Image: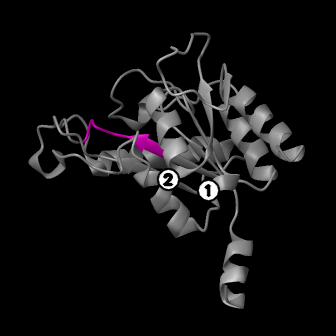
Amino acid sequence: MTPENEMTNASKRGAVFLDRDKTVIEDPGYINDPDLVHLLPGAAQAIRSLNEAGYLVVIVTNQSGVARGLVTEERLAEIHARLKSELAHHGATVENIYYCPYHPEGVIELYTRESDLRKPAPGMLLSAADELGIDLPSSWMVGDSARDVEAGKRAGCRTIRLTHGGEVGDDEPQADATVNDLPAATQVILQTDASGG
């Protein structure tokens, strides 16, 4: 390994990848209006805690509503700008928001296809790692669905499943930890990494 490579690896950081809907914001269905963006209780404070601990926070979200003709990419950009603004109001920052607009059952031809960006494929996480200098084994994927857990595992991250009081089926991918919500997940991340786990 050359000194340049050693320096590059040393400069990589751990990240926390977050699903969007039912992880950071409420999920009333396909969101197609920035006014429908409402942070979940404690989400902004949890993200701020991760920021303060030195993690990059990155949102990775499937947005098949684009392929289904329910929201345009331009409107999605407005929705994500509102989300960042709401977080910033509470002193919280996300480094970037990656989304997959594709779905094989779409009605908009441009977006109607399979994609390795769509979770449970790990494409969005791998792209973020490449673009932002993220060390995947030091990172976490947090989300409320089996496909979030699988995407995280396939990318080489540790994983946390949010249940919101429900249960995880035995036949679903098992996360490294299972908790109720994002504030609880943040506690697991901070405590695990502080103890070298």
State left or right for residue 153 relative to residue 63.
Answer: right
Work out whether mark 2 precedes mark 1 in sequence or the reverse, and give the earlier one.
Answer: 2
State left or right for residue 164 relative to residue 7.
Answer: left
Query: Percent position (x, y) of residue 128?
Result: 51, 60
Report the residue at 69% width, 42% height from top.
47
Q: Is residue 82 visible?
A: no
Query: Percent position (x, y) of residue 189?
Result: 76, 39
Against 65, residue 50 (above or below) is below
- Do the residues bearing badges 2 and 1 touch, measured as CB atoms within 8 Å? yes
Residue 29 colored in magenta in the image: no
In this figure, which residue is indicated by the disc labeled 1? 136
Query: Percent position (x, y) of residue 25?
Result: 53, 30
- The type of residue carrying mark 2 is Leu
- Asked whether 9 or 190 is in front, the reply is 9
- Asked whether 8 or 45 is in front, the reply is 8
Is the residue marked by circle 1 packed among few (<14), some (14-19), or many (20+) residues within 10 Å?
many
Report the residue at 16% width, 34% height from top.
105
Q: Can residue 5 be seen in this view?
A: yes
Q: Mark 2 to mark 1: distance in Å?
A: 8 Å
In this figure, which residue is indicated by the disc labeled 2? 125
Q: Which residue lies furthest to the right in this view?
A: 195
Q: Which residues lie in the magenta part?
A: 60-66
Can you say which quadrant of the picture contains the C terminus? top right
Which SS class for mark 1?
A: helix
